[in-house]
Image (tube, rainbow, N blue to C red):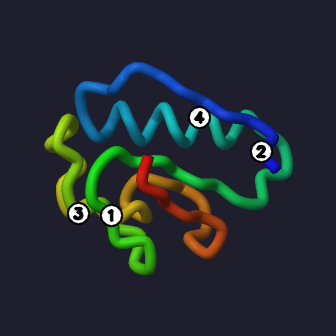
Amino acid sequence: SFIEIEKFPTPKNLNDLSTKINNFINDIPNVQNVCIGVAGFIDKKNKIIIKCPHIPFLKDLHIEDVLDIPMDSVSIEND
């Protein structure tokens, strides 16, 4: 089950996105798993956003390049 769900306006760049997500995660005590929903094409196994039509700066992005938490606790899903 979900403990927290965060929705926010689309950031203007990758640095703003990274800051927003990491601040949210760090504000929740004892986070064990994180799931990121992405509208676009993803590679779930390798945790890569292949293409996100409305957010071009996410193209070919490895989630590990954005998050400051261990990757074994992260998953991505198509939103």
Q: In the rendered picture of this protein, how many numbered marks are placed on residues?
A: 4
- The residue that disc 1 covers is 42
In primary-sequence order, the first of circles 2 and 4 is: 2
Which mark lies nearer to you, 4 or 3? 3
User: Where residue 16 sits in the image (x, y, percent)?
Assistant: 35, 31
In primary-sequence order, the first of circles 3 and 1 is: 1
Q: CA distance from mark 2 to mark 4?
A: 18 Å
In primary-sequence order, the first of circles 2 and 1 is: 2
Is mark 4 in CB contact (under 8 Å) with mark 3?
no
**Numbered disc 2: secondary structure:** loop
Q: Residues within 10 Å of mark 1 (few under 14, many from 20)?
A: many
- The residue that disc 3 covers is 50
- The residue that disc 4 covers is 23
Tell which of 37 and 12 is nearer to you.
37
- The residue that disc 2 covers is 2
In primary-sequence order, the first of circles 4 and 3 is: 4
